[in-house]
Image: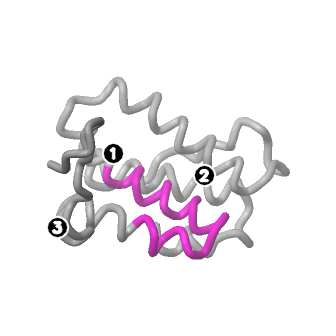
Amino acid sequence: MVAWLQCSAQLSSATTGYLCDALLAWALLGGDWPDPAEPVAGPDCDHLEALVQVIDRWRRRALAEPIGRRLDLAHVGRGLATAVACQRDPDALAERQWREMVHRQPWLAGPPAPYVLADGRVL
């Protein structure tokens, strides 16, 4: 569903909000459909703005959840953040995936740069 949201600009913001809430329910509760929740700005607001509102709503809900469920929510939330970034910049997905891979496997970025002291010595 997150992959579908990456190309969902033609969907209404209300539909996108409903899909995001469904993702939240599956991530936290293992299923069931939530009650549809309209974006705060109304049905005719900007699509990306509505997605951001839904993600903010997730963050508020997450504060009431146990830590195990928060981790699940964070995983799905990262997917939604990637979907929003890809709507704004098609190259954002590849760049984000590269940064995450380098963060997990720092040796992919190459050797660290030498550290030069004030007196000119290199560590």
88 or 74: nearer the eye? Answer: 88
The image shows residue 66, relative to residue 80, as above or below, that is: above
Residue 15 within the magenta-colored segment of the rendering: no
Q: Amino acid at mark 1?
A: Leu
Residue 63: image location, x then y, percent: 36, 25
Residue located beneath label 1 in the image: 73
Residue range corresponding to the magenta coloring: 75-96
Q: Amino acid at mark 3?
A: Trp
Please state if 64 lies on the left or on the right of 42 as rendered: left
Q: Nearer the viewer, residue 64 or 84?
A: 84
Residue 39 in the image: above or below residue 6:
above
83 and 44: which one is in front?
83
Q: CA distance from mark 1 to mark 3?
A: 29 Å
Judging by the rendered image, the residue that carries numbered circle 2 is 17
* CA distance for labels 1 and 2: 16 Å
Q: Residue at x 58, y 47 (%)?
A: 36
Earlier residue among tags 1 and 3: 1
* Element at label 2: helix
Q: What amino acid is labelled 2 in the image?
A: Gly
| Sequence-first disc among 1 and 2 | 2
| Rendered residue at 74%/72% (across/down) | 10
Q: Which residue is mark 3?
A: 107
**Measuring 37% from the left and 69% from the top, which residue is drawn there?**
97
Q: CA distance from mark 2 to mark 3?
A: 39 Å
* Number of marks: 3
